[in-house]
Amino acid sequence: MIDEKKLIEAVKELHAQKKNFSQSYDLTISLKDLNLKDPKDQVEFFAQLPHKTGRKVPVCALVGPEMIDEAKRTADRAIEQSEFDKLKKNDVRKLASQCEYFVGQANIMPKIAATFGRALGPRGKMPNPKAGCIVPPKAPLAPLIEKLQSTVKVSARKSPTIQIRVGTQKMSESDVIDNVRSAYDQIIHHLPREENNVKAVYFKLTMSPPIKLR
């Protein structure tokens, strides 16, 4: 387990380090005794945190005509199916770098894959059902987009290290602590041997040296 006293002290110490911008808090977990060539030992899931992570998470909706109006109201970017063929490769690559999550309408997923797969696939950003990002026609988008603001992708498939953003200095110390606890708990329950696979846990700001929590 993470030492509760160390966590509280680390958050207080880092929260007091002021810059002329709000830095992000990163939680890094170094793993051990995993064979990442074996899919059973690989880690990839979407963690739902109790609080937003402090920065706007840009969401792009890729939808048919029946959903485009709501998508334009609720998502940061909304692209209707009829526009797909008009997009240039550079437009798609730019979109892939600008948005963190992509929501896709279920019945046009083959078209989405054909148009956006080469740009989104390598970045792990294709609409993912595990994050709730493949939706039926006319599904309400606002609740999903709100939920994605406190969702983080956790991945350890090629390297035995997990690093996720759990907050910013704009957030209250208690909210950051809640997010760290929740993220750590979810991560260990996705490891084959739970805490026996944890080598070390570090906590830091964008521009600070790491503090070891475990």
Image (cartoon, grey):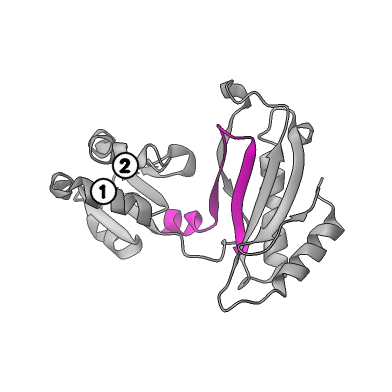
The one of 87 and 211 positioned closer to us in this rendering: 211
- Tell me where residue 73 appears, x and y as whole percent: 30, 64
Q: Residue at x 77, y 69 (%)?
A: 13
The one of 207 and 27 positioned closer to us in this rendering: 207
Rounded to the nearest angstrom, the CA distance separating label 2 from label 1 is 7 Å
Q: In this rendering, is residue 190 above or below 26?
A: above
Residue 54 colored in magenta in the image:
no
Q: Residue at x 43, y 57 (%)?
A: 145
For this orientation, the residue located farthest to the top is: 38
Residue holding disc 2: 119
Query: Is 22 situated left or right of 120 in this image?
Result: right
Element type at mark 1: helix
| Label placed on residue 30 | none
Residue 33 occupies quadrant:
top right
Q: Amino acid at mark 2?
A: Ala
Q: Which residues are magenta?
A: 142-167
Q: Quadrant of the N terminus?
A: top right
- Tell me where residue 50 appears, x and y as whole percent: 63, 57
Q: Residue at x 67, y 57 (%)?
A: 179
Query: Is 183 situated left or right of 111 in this image?
Result: right
- Tell me where residue 177 appears, x and y as whole percent: 72, 61
Q: In this rendering, is residue 122 above or below 17?
A: above
Residue 205 occupies quadrant:
bottom right
| Label placed on residue 92 | 1
User: In terms of sequence position, does the residue under pointer 2 or pointer 1 come before the other?
Assistant: 1
Mark 1 surroundings: few (<14), some (14-19) or many (≥20) residues within 10 A: some
Q: Residue at x 34, y 54 (%)?
A: 60
Asked if the residue at tag 1 contacts the one at tag 2, i.e. Cβ–Cβ closer than 8 Å, the answer is yes
Q: Amino acid at mark 1?
A: Val
Residue 146 colored in magenta in the image:
yes
Residue 114 makes an appearance in the image: yes
- Tell me where residue 56 appears, x and y as whole percent: 47, 64
